[in-house]
Image (cartoon, rainbow, N blue to C red):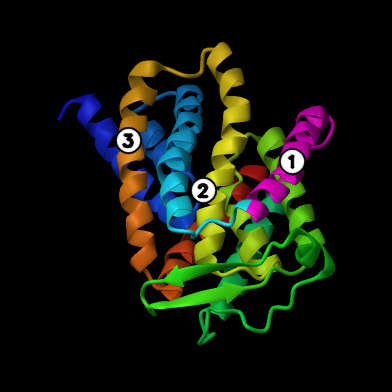
């Protein structure tokens, strides 16, 4: 197989998983590019940024059409992520990065353990979630059609300040450590704000594209984006994201959590080891 064909296949795989989990696909594409294909980490990260935008472009439109994506939540929380990214850039060189890697890695591992507990829950509708004052004021509640159960599910959004704070931390992690923050976005909506896992993942797919677009120009001007790598990868990811957005609609919430937990644990441990 030629390198272009391999990049297309890698992108296809990354796009499917990125759309289903709301992570952008970079967690899959970057290790394959660096370890299996011998691409420099500098160019792999640049291609990963473009991959995130491609995943968001392919999946977000589909999720919006299917009313799976909560646009009000996305736009509100993106404020925190943007401010956090700017803060992270300003803090660069001041705060020890090793400490932050360990801190955020431990948070992901803790969240993976918390999601294991959620697997024992019999319902994903989160009827026990009560909207707080900010959620009612901004009308953040929404409804989506769950195809596996074949019914409409209405959900409330709670603990908005906590979710906003988590998004601010995700922005700092993205701006200071140069990592993707899709996992933190999903955690903020699912674990803190009480949203179901499907709308959380769908909404994250829109938000990661906005965040990545802000930093893509920096990577472009410093020469980190190689068209011969990012081009085929993005085409594969765009197709994979469209497929993944279709697959996610038919997956049960429990299945998505079972896929998400090992990914979270892997990312958390990888960050902790890198910090140490």
Q: Residue 177 occupies which quadrant of the picture? A: top right
Determine the residue positioned at 74% across, 69% down.
158
**Res. 172 mark:** 1
- Label 1 and label 3: CA atoms lie apart by 30 Å
Q: Position of residue 232 (x, y in %)?
A: 30, 27
User: Viewer-nearest of labels 1 and 3?
Assistant: 1
Q: Position of residue 184 (x, y in %)?
A: 63, 53
Q: Position of residue 54 (x, y in %)?
A: 43, 35
Residue placed under numbered mark 2 in the picture: 205
The answer to whether residue 96 is magenta is yes
Q: Residue 239 occupies which quadrant of the picture? A: top left
Determine the residue positioned at 48% across, 27% down.
41
Q: Which residues are magenta?
A: 72-101
Relative to residue 275, is residue 40 depicted above or below?
above
**Res. 268 mark:** none
Number of residues whose C-alpha sits closer than 10 Å to that of mark 2, classed few (under 14), some (14–19) or many (20 or more)? many
Residue placed under numbered mark 3 in the picture: 36
Q: Main secondary structure of the magenta part?
A: helix
SS state under label 2? helix
Determine the residue positioned at 53% across, 56% down.
69
Cβ–Cβ under 8 Å for marks 2 and 3: no
Q: Nearer the viewer, residue 81 or 103?
A: 81
Q: Position of residue 89 (x, y in %)?
A: 76, 29
Q: Earlier in the sequence, mark 1 or mark 3?
A: 3
């Amino acid at each position: 197989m030629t390198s272009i064909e391999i990049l297309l296949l890698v992108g296809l795989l990354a796009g499917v998983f990125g759309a289903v989990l709301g992570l952008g696909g970079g967690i899959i594409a970057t290790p394959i590019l660096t370890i299996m294909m011998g691409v420099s980490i500098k160019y792999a990260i640049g291609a990963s940024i473009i991959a995130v935008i491609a995943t968001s472009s392919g999946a977000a439109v589909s999720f919006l059409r299917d009313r799976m994506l909560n646009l009000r939540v996305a736009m509100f929380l993106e404020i925190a992520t943007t401010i956090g990214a700017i803060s992270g850039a300003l803090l660069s060189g001041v705060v020890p990065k090793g400490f932050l890697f360990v801190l955020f890695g431990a948070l992901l591992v803790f969240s993976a353990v918390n999601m294991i507990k959620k697997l024992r829950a019999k319902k994903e509708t989160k009827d026990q979630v009560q909207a707080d004052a900010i959620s009612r004021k901004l009308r953040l509640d929404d409804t989506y059609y769950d195809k596996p159960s074949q019914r409409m599910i209405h959900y409330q959004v709670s603990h908005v300040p906590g979710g906003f704070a988590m998004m601010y931390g995700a922005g700092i992690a993205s701006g200071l450590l140069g990592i993707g923050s899709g996992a933190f976005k999903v955690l903020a909506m699912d674990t803190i704000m009480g949203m179901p896992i499907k709308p959380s993942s769908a909404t994250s797919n829109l938000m990661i594209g906005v965040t990545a677009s802000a930093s893509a120009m920096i990577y472009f001007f410093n020469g980190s984006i190689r068209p011969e790598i990012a081009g085929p990868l993005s085409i594969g990811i765009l197709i994979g994201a469209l497929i993944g957005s279709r697959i996610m609609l038919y997956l049960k919430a429990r299945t998505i959590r079972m896929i998400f937990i090992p990914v979270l644990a892997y990312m958390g441990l990888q960050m902790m080891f890198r910090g140490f």
